Image (tube, rainbow, N blue to C red):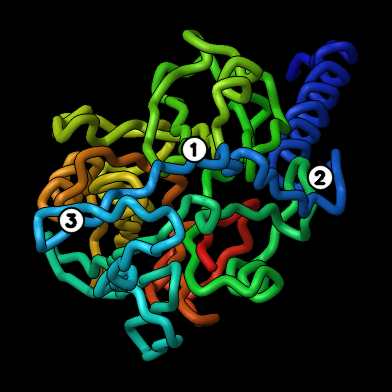
Amino acid sequence: MKKQRPIWVIVFGLLLSAYTAYVMMDVFVIKRPMQENVTEINLALFATATPTPLPPTPTPNPGGSSSTNPAEPTPTDPPTPTPTPPWFSEEVVATDTLYKNDHLFVEITHYREHKTDIHVAEVRMTSAQYLLTAFAKDTYGRNILDKPTRMMKTKDAIFCVNGDNYGAREGGYVIRNGFLYRTVGNSSYKMEVLCIMPDGDFYFTHSSRETAQSLLDKGVWQGFTFGPVLLDNGEFKVNPRSEVDLCYVQNPRTAIGMVEPLHYFFVVADGRTEQSYGLSLYQMADFMQRLGCTKAYNLDGGGSSTMAFRGKVINFPTGDGTYYEREVADIVYVR
């Protein structure tokens, strides 16, 4: 005769299953808005002091003598207008692969390496105030999601990629557009923090070294927690065996790199299909170094990896091999 389990064992098993299901639902499904109508942008970070006026430059006298009559004006040459850098334009230029205006330049290029389609956006700007972020539905919280193309439309964005998927985790600093939203760090050594400063420079740190408030006090404009850092000062920070938690060695990837302040490369690699295998972290770092990046950082990848330009997705986002623009928690965009 088969021995029956004690009733407490059955009850414990049911409770454990219910708790596990609740935890999974809480992490991936249950929406928990914490702050709505999040649209503020702290442009005060870009305020600069009024420069001290320089004394007038004496105009040389071709005759070798200077005027001693204060009523007699000294002739001066008209000021030379500052030329517009070639990557900007006084008038808007917009094509399927190029956009530029008086403060922004975006050019899209596609590559193929390692049996993978790689999509690259070179971005230049006159100020980091044009490098912005947005939460899905303008709401900070857990599991609040929206499609990148819908988010960029509401922000009049020219270009965007997915962000760090902050809403899927309890920890990890969140600083966006100059405001601090989450002060709890992340204990994983791989979850490094990318700080974008008002001058456009990149600064890397970790929650074990600095508090979120100290970063805000330093004037951090954007702060992401994902990683790892791919390049720093032109040197590799990953190796062929490096990998983030819970993903494949070759994977769809999203990364952001800096050549110098205000000159960036955004890279999205397709993956998980027969057409595109995906890149390892080391392959992504190597690719970005060859683009000229001196600093580079890995953002959320996998099925979230999305690049959109002028309202259209230009890569092949997928989680299972079929095209699908996944809803994400946040985007990084320019306008």
Label count reads 3
Provide the secondary structure element on which disc 3 rests.
loop
The residue tagged 2 is: 30
Front residue of 75/241: it is 75
* Label 3 vs label 1, nearer the camera: 3
In the drawing, does residue 1 fall left or right of residue 148? right
In terms of sequence position, does the residue under pointer 2 or pointer 1 come before the other?
A: 2
**Which quadrant of the structure image shows residue 5?**
top right
Between the residue at mark 2 and the residue at mark 1, the CA separation in whole angstroms equals 55 Å
Provide the secondary structure element on which disc 1 rests.
loop
In the drawing, does residue 267 fall left or right of residue 290? right
The residue tagged 3 is: 60
Residue at 37 percent across and 90 percent down: it is 95
Q: Residue 22, image x and y in percent?
A: 80, 34
Q: Amino acid at mark 1?
A: Thr
In the drawing, does residue 247 fall left or right of residue 279? right
Quadrant of the drawing holding the N terminus = top right
Q: Residues within 10 Å of mark 2 (few under 14, many from 20)?
A: some
Residue at 47 percent across and 36 percent down: it is 197
Q: Residue 23, image x and y in percent?
A: 75, 31
Residue at 26 percent across and 57 percent down: it is 278
The residue tagged 1 is: 52
Q: Residues within 10 Å of mark 3 (few under 14, many from 20)?
A: few
**Which quadrant of the structure image shows residue 269?**
bottom left
Provide the secondary structure element on which disc 2 rests.
loop
* Label 2 vs label 1, nearer the camera: 1
Q: Amino acid at mark 2?
A: Ile
Between the residue at mark 3 and the residue at mark 1, the CA separation in whole angstroms equals 24 Å
Is any atom of residue 309 visible in this view?
Answer: yes
Front residue of 251/288: it is 288
Front residue of 97/217: it is 217
Q: Residue 26, image x and y in percent?
A: 77, 37
